[in-house]
Image (spheres, rainbow, N blue to C red):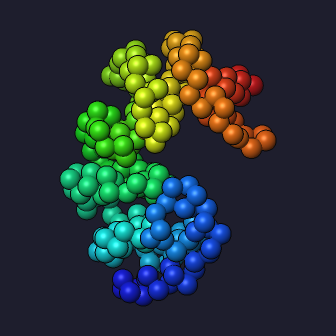
Amino acid sequence: MNLSETISTLKSLADEKVRKQHIKGGARENLFGVKMGDIKSLAKKIKTNHRLGLELWATENIDARMLAILILNPKELSAAEIEKMLSSEQFTWAADWFYNYIIKEYPDKEKFRERWMDSKDIMLARAGWSLTAGRVTRDSEGLDIVAILNRIESDMPAAAKETQWTMNTTLAQIGINHIKYRERALEIGEKLGVFRDYPVSKGCTSPFAPSWINAMVSRQEK
């Protein structure tokens, strides 16, 4: 499929309910509103096609970009390209897909982590803290967790909501995975109160860090 054919296919899969949902969630108007399942099915048909992926990304259409994320080859992207692409996408859903399918698959992703945590660019900072949450969860050797907790305590209240979300995830993962720092993580969460009143569906775990930590620790103990 070429670019024109792919865009036509995406347009034919448009769902107005999905479009309205995305716009309500902060998406720009340049989208069709294609269901995630349909985007994934189309990606499976196309398979990896790096050139087409770059062309789709350049359209700035959200559905096209989400498809692009699934067919790009992360190893063919330079560090500069990754940073530029991530910084250009302000819709958090698409930015998080980029993180999960591109950045997490990038061989040298650690080079981004500390630099992005310090970035004034909201989406880079969001991804930097996502990388830190991943390190805390799976590979914390060499991390100064005390310094990370101190920074969360001082910086999270004034952070942009997009960055606040992944900083909070880092706080929760410290409390869940590191018993030595659990009490401190709980104290910080209670003190800051970030996401304390976040609405959640019945049966779902609250993103409020103390609730999240206690729920996951309880499951582990069982």
User: Is residue 19 shown left or right of residue 97?
Assistant: right
Q: How many marks?
A: 0
Across and down, in percent, residue 141 comes to 37, 23
Using the image, determine if residue 71 lies above or below residue 157.
below
Nearer the observer, 173 or 195: 195
Residue visible at 60% across and 66% down? 20
Q: Quadrant of residue 48?
A: bottom left
Q: Quadrant of the C terminus?
A: top right
Residue at screen point 30% across, 48% down: 107
Q: Quadrant of the N terminus?
A: bottom left
Q: Position of residue 149 (x, y in %)?
A: 43, 19
On screen, residue 46 above or below 195: below
**Compared to 181, does 202 lie above or below?**
below
Q: On the rendered structure, is 80 left or right of 176?
A: left
- Quarter location, residue 221: top right
Residue lying farthest to the right in this orientation: 202
Q: Residue 98 location, x and y as percent?
A: 41, 55
150 and 72: which one is in front?
150
Residue at 46% across, 63% down: 28
**Residue 38 or residue 14, whichever sits in front:** 14
| Residue 112 can be seen, yes or no | yes
Residue 110 seen by the camera: no
State the residue in front, 78 or 22: 22
Image point (37%, 68%), residue name: 60
